[in-house]
């Protein structure tokens, strides 16, 4: 009987450890700071949002800079948050090939659902009764104020939820 209890205890410890190890990112401040720092560094190298030769070069630069920001000290980007920063770069209009031809568009939700953010051509945005471009300076579908909980269409600039 002791073997069974020891086995169950070992399994519960392993499951608990796995949940902690694979927990999602919860540090919005670190994500916001990492996005800003990576963008500044990429801009200095000529691969910032407006100057990158293409979208791939922009995302690649942000990815490289984000990996360098990972650390364990307070204020540094937790490793489990790197995906959030990279996702924001990927869901952007940054890069010479996209910046002049795409917009960040809020497409109305169906059946009472909230609007969704889409990167699309301005005419497609209008055809779907969308609004774009979004607030000045927002080049991504990720919220600048709430990157973990809301997209650009569902967050207010002040950080307070719209609803």
Image (cartoon, rainbow, N blue to C red):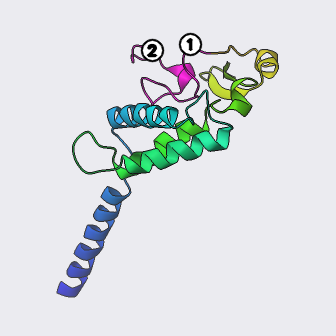
Q: Position of residue 111 (x, y in %)?
A: 68, 22
Q: Residues within 10 Å of mark 1 (few under 14, many from 20)?
A: few
The label number, if any, that marks residue 135 in the structure image? 1
The crowding category of the residue bearing disc 2, from other C-alpha atoms within 10 Å (few below 14, some 14 to 19, many at least 20), is some
Residue 123 x/y as whole percent: 82, 18
Q: Nearer the viewer, residue 45 or 106?
A: 45
Work out which residue is located at the far left of the displayed protein and give it. 2
Residue 154, image x, y percentages: 53, 21
Residue drawn at point x = 47 percent, y = 40 percent = 85
Q: In the displayed structure, would residue 31 be above or below residue 160?
A: below
Q: Secondary structure at mark 1?
A: loop
100 or 156, nearer to the observer = 100
Indicate yes or no whether the magenta region holds residue 135: yes
Q: Compared to 138, does 69 lie above or below?
A: below
- The range drawn in magenta is 134-163
- Give how far apart the Cα atoms at labels 2 and 1 are: 9 Å
Asked which quadrant contains residue 131, the reply is top right
Residue 109 lies in magenta, yes or no?
Answer: no
Q: Which mark is residue 157?
A: 2
Q: Is residue 1 visible?
A: no
Q: Main secondary structure of the magenta part?
A: loop
Q: Considering the numbered disc 2 on the image, is that residue within a helix, a strand or a loop?
A: loop
Foreground pick, 61 / 31: 61
Numbered mark located on residue 95 in the image: none
The residue that appears at 30% across and 73% down in the rendered structure is 11
> Residue at 61% of width from left, 23% of height from top?
113
Give coordinates of residue 90: x percent, y percent: 60, 40
Are the residues at dot 2 and dot 1 in contact (C-beta closer than 8 Å)? yes
Along the horizontal axis of the image, is 127 left or right of 63? right
């Amino acid at each position: 009987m002791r073997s069974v209890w020891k086995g169950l205890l070992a399994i519960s410890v392993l499951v608990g450890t796995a949940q902690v190890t694979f927990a999602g990112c919860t540090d919005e401040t670190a994500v916001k700071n990492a996005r800003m720092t990576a963008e500044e560094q990429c801009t200095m190298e000529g691969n910032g949002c407006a100057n990158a030769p293409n979208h791939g070069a922009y995302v690649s630069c942000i990815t490289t800079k984000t990996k360098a920001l990972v650390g364990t000290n307070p204020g540094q980007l937790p490793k489990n948050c790197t995906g959030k920063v990279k996702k924001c770069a990927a869901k952007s209009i940054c890069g010479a090939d996209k910046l002049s031809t795409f917009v960040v568009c809020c497409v109305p939700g169906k059946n009472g659902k909230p609007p969704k953010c889409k990167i699309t051509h301005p005419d497609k945005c209008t055809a779907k009764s969308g609004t774009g471009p979004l607030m000045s300076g927002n080049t991504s579908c990720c919220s600048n104020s709430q990157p973990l909980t809301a997209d650009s269409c569902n967050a207010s600039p002040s950080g307070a939820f719209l609803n």
